[in-house]
Structure formats: structure tokens, C-alpha cells
Amino acid sequence: MTGYSIATIPGDGIGQEVIPVGQRAAEAAAAKHGFTLSWTEFDWSCQRYAETGQMMPDDGVDQVRNHDAIYLGAVGWPGVPDHVSLWGLLIPLRRQLNLWANVRPVRLLKGVQSPLAGRTPEEIDFIVVRENVEGEYSEIGGRLYHGTDQEMAIQEAVFTRRGTDRIMEYAFQIASERKASGYRGHVTSATKSNGIMHSMPFWDERFEVMATRHPEIATSKYHIDILTAHFVLHPDWFDVVVGSNLFGDILSDLGPAVAGSIGIAPAANINPDRTAPSMFEPVHGSAPDIAGKGIANPVAAVWTAAMMLEHLGEVEAAKTLERAIEVSLESPVTRTRDLGGTADTAPCAQSIIAAIGQ
Ligand code: ATP
Ligand code: MG
């Protein structure tokens, strides 16, 4: 029987509550579809930072490198600065494992209300692909004339042809795959070449080159300012949206918001070259305000597990999980409170697991 080894990092807050649900759901799907999952748990978190001064050990990246995938809950806790959890864990993993594509499906599930009045599941169903390792989030820059009237901060953005082409190619590939299963086959590029003088014209240029390599896929491009407006006003225009690290970051938070709730949105940090394991994590954070109460919505963690199984090649198992989620969202009795239901985490989880068995 095929088996996969998963490195699990529940992390902080509700990560501890929702990751076990995702594991149980993934195991139920694995049992149904004839493969096995083995889990190795790592306690990397802000709690570990408080105790040891490190989010993860020095050789942390190497400890997870030989697994087939990484399943992460959430890291971050009040009192621990964001840059500690970011630079002490997430960024080293992203960079050293070459997780250069960040992928977020944005889909309005049945049973979920979009904040955009009257929108139906057919109208909100697209994927945001974010460049995850270069672009605007670079370490190049610094401060000059500190403490004087002339003080300035300089921040460089770095766009390589390799980094730009590969993220665009990845977006086109996703669009082609989607087209094969009935979607429109359309890639939208997020740009700002009317204001940013060097990097964004380069981005546009490479987008045109990549588009000519995929004549079967339609394209459009929008400046990021109007594009955010279109996400809200015309979510039905989008199929696959590709953006730089910064623009993709913005769009990949806005997208899940229009799809209803942060409590359902999944995300993946992918190494498309498959030279290292990819990392799967819900969009939501550790939610300190509800942590420990047993009321967190486990759907994002389960949907994230579905993305992980799909990446591992277990497409049918992934579909089983997605269907089970939709069954559990049908009734307010099994929906959690963030979706207007009455359920705590446990009954919502039970309904998902039960639906997997059906
Ligand atoms: P981060 O900075 O780590 O991205 P954050 O602190 O900005 O996270 P979250 O931790 O995602 O944001 O929480 C934002 C809000 O959404 C909180 O009110 C939280 O309770 C709620 N929330 C987040 N995830 C869930 C969930 N799975 N179920 C229910 N509510 C959630
Ligand atoms: Mg936070």
C-alpha cells in the first residue's frame, strides 16, 4: 500500500485544535482510498520560543526535508513579535525548501454566505497564485542619515526572469488543468506598471511572453488598485490570478474574505519542482481570541489537508474531503458559529468524518 510521511506542525492557538481534525479526516479518506499516512509531530511554536528562545531548532528545515509534505496549523501569539514567527519559522521553510508558489483557492462553498450580497457558488471560484520567495519582500535596502531631517529608508524589490517566468508558467499550467475540467482557462496578471517603473514593466513583459506560450489560455491584466475593486465587484471574472509577492499577498487575503470566512480558507506553499516537501496551512492564524474554547472552525484545516492529498497525487481522496466539507456545511447544526451555525469544533469535525465514510 502506498504510504506518505507527513511532518505536522500544529503551532499555536487554534492550530492545536484544528490540525488533529484535519489529520483524522485525512486518515479516514486514506482508509477509504487505500493508502496510509504517517505523522511526525514537531512542537515548533511561539510557546517553544518562549521556553527556548527559538521557534524551531537550528536544523529544523533539515528535520522536515525528507517528509512527503508538511502540514502546519498556525504560528503567532500575542507578545511574540510577528517577525519572530515569520523569520524564525515560516520564511526559512519557504526559502530553504524552495516553496516558491503560494496557492490559495477561493471558492464560495454551498452553505457559506459571502459578504458580497447575492453571490452564488458558481460566481466565486478562482485561484490566487502568489510568488513566494522574491519580489518586493527582499532584504536589500536600509536606512540613511539616521536621526536627521534627511533620514530615509530604501527598500529594493528583486524580480528575476527565472523567478517571474516560473510563477507565471505555474499559473498557466493550473489554468490549463482547470480548463480540462471545465473552467474557462484564463489567467489574470496583477501589475502596477503605471506607477512602478522598473519591476512591473518587466513583470508585464514576461507575462506577455508566457502568454504566447499558452495560446489556449486567455489573459488579462489589471493594476493592483483596480484589481482589488474587481475582486469585490466582479469575482466572477476570475479563473487564475497571478501576482508578485506583495500583490499576491494582498489578493490572497482579499480572495478568501470574499469567499465567506477565514475559518474555511486553505493555502499551500508549493515547491513545484518537487525537490522538497510542500507545506500546507490554513489561511487563518492562531486566533488567540477563541483559542482553547473548542469553537474554532476546522473546515480550513480539512480543506488544507485536501490540497495536501491532491498534491501527493491522491486526487480522489482530496475530492472525498471536499465533498465531506460541503455536507457538513449544509446544516447550521454542524456549521460553526463563524458561519452562522451553532456547532463547536467537535460536532463539526464529527459530521465531516461521518460524511467521508458515506
Ligand atoms: P495572523 O496574524 O496569524 O495571520 P490574525 O491574528 O491576523 O492572524 P486570525 O488568527 O486568523 O488573525 O484571526 C482573525 C479573526 O478570525 C479572529 O477573530 C479569529 O477568532 C477568527 N478566526 C480565525 N480562524 C478561525 C477559525 N478557524 N474559526 C473561527 N474563527 C476564526
Ligand atoms: Mg496575528
Image (tube, rainbow, N blue to C red):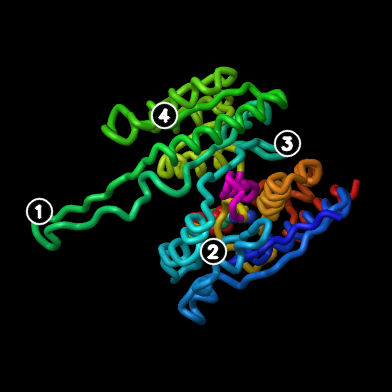
Q: Residue type at mark 1: give it.
A: Gln
| CA–CA distance in space, label 1 to label 4 | 37 Å
Residue of label 2 = 75
Tag 3 or tag 2, which sits nearer the N-term?
2
Identify the residue at horizontal 67%, vertical 61% (top origin): 67
Is residue 114 visible to the viewer in this orientation of the structure? Answer: yes
Q: Residue type at mark 2: give it.
A: Val
User: Of the residues tagged 1 and 3, which is closer to the observer?
Assistant: 1
Check mark 2 vs ligand 1: CB closer than 8 Å? yes or no: yes
60 w.r.t. 71: above or below: below
User: Of the residues tagged 4 and 3, which is closer to the observer?
Assistant: 4
Marking on residue 206: 4
Residue 80: quadrant of the picture: bottom left
Which class describes the residues within 10 Å of circle 4: few (<14), some (14-19), or many (20+)?
A: some
Nearer to me, 112 or 307: 307
Image side of residue 193 versus residue 86, left or right: left
Q: Which residues are magenta?
A: 261-276
Identify the residue at horizontal 83%, vertical 53% (top origin): 30
Check mark 4 vs ligand 1: CB closer than 8 Å? yes or no: no
